[in-house]
Amino acid sequence: MDKPANTDWVVELKKVCKSFNVGKPNEIEILHSIDLQLGCGDFCAVMGPSGSGKSTLLNIIGLLDRPTSGQLIINGEETTQLDDHALTRLRGHAIGFVFQHHHLLSAFTALENVMMPMMGSKGYCTLEMTIRAKRLLDSVDLLPMCNQASGSMSGGQQQRVAVARALAMNPALLLADEPTGNLDTKSADAVFELLRRVSTEQGTSVLFVTHNPELAERCDKTIQVVDGQVV
């Protein structure tokens, strides 16, 4: 019998493998028996060369893809047997995403962008959502620009809005995939420090994919992914 999930971990992977083209002559295994744990408030860099499996690993942890075998536990809930509806629910409430490109709706204001996850969950807008979105924008020093169209903001400002949006549902886990890759040095440092502050003050666990060794050195720990394995 499997041991119960360890609720001390926000993320726990047990012998996770991921293959593509399963059962076909060109089947290939991308991730090989990954064991990984991330605790509450951990701030962890993920590094590795292109093609090493970083993105595949992040997609699996983010419940955007399913492992071929092994166990993935998010917030104490074993996920590999969940149906698509349950995965969507868990992903929407437990995980926030910040990507290299902010993926904001440029015609919408910063406030409207941050409110989107909350409105998507409820299906309608409430005063409480507006208040929370304004507080989040204040936390990233953008409250005075809350009614400005996101498309008119600088790259660094847009990425800070994206961080606020990722926190809208108060997730236990924040996945950041090269969030500073398109930014100048000053803006990149500001976004990094914002993510660090979120982790410290709110206890949010952060997985931060980067190719920048200087940023990785400022994280609590670094996971190296090489040829589909954590080394």
Image (cartoon, rainbow, N blue to C red):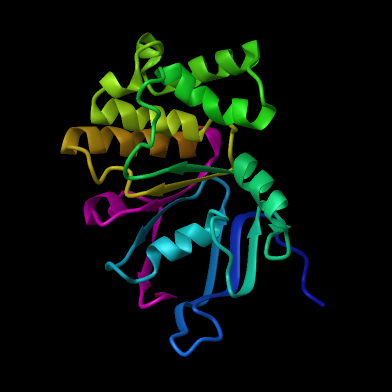
- Circle count: 0
Q: Nearer the viewer, residue 45 or 133?
A: 133
Place residue 122 in its image quadrant: top right
Q: Residue furthest front?
A: 24
Q: Residue furthest right?
A: 1
Q: Position of residue 206 (x, y in %)?
A: 47, 47
Q: Nearer the viewer, residue 182 or 84?
A: 84
Q: Position of residue 190 (x, y in %)?
A: 28, 32
Q: Position of residue 147 (x, y in %)?
A: 40, 10
Looking at the picture, does residue 27 appear above or below residue 190?
below
Looking at the picture, does residue 203 appear above or below residue 222?
above
Q: Residue at x 33, y 43 (%)?
A: 179
The magenta stretch is 202-230
Image-based side of 162 in relation to 5, left or right: left
* Quarter of the image that includes the C terminus: bottom left
Image-based side of 124 in relation to 62, left or right: right
> Is 217 one of the magenta-colored residues?
yes
Q: Position of residue 61 (x, y in %)?
A: 54, 58
Q: Nearer the viewer, residue 15 or 89?
A: 89
Q: Residue at x 24, y 56 (%)?
A: 213
Q: Residue at x 46, y 58 (%)?
A: 58
* Quarter of the image that includes the N terminus: bottom right
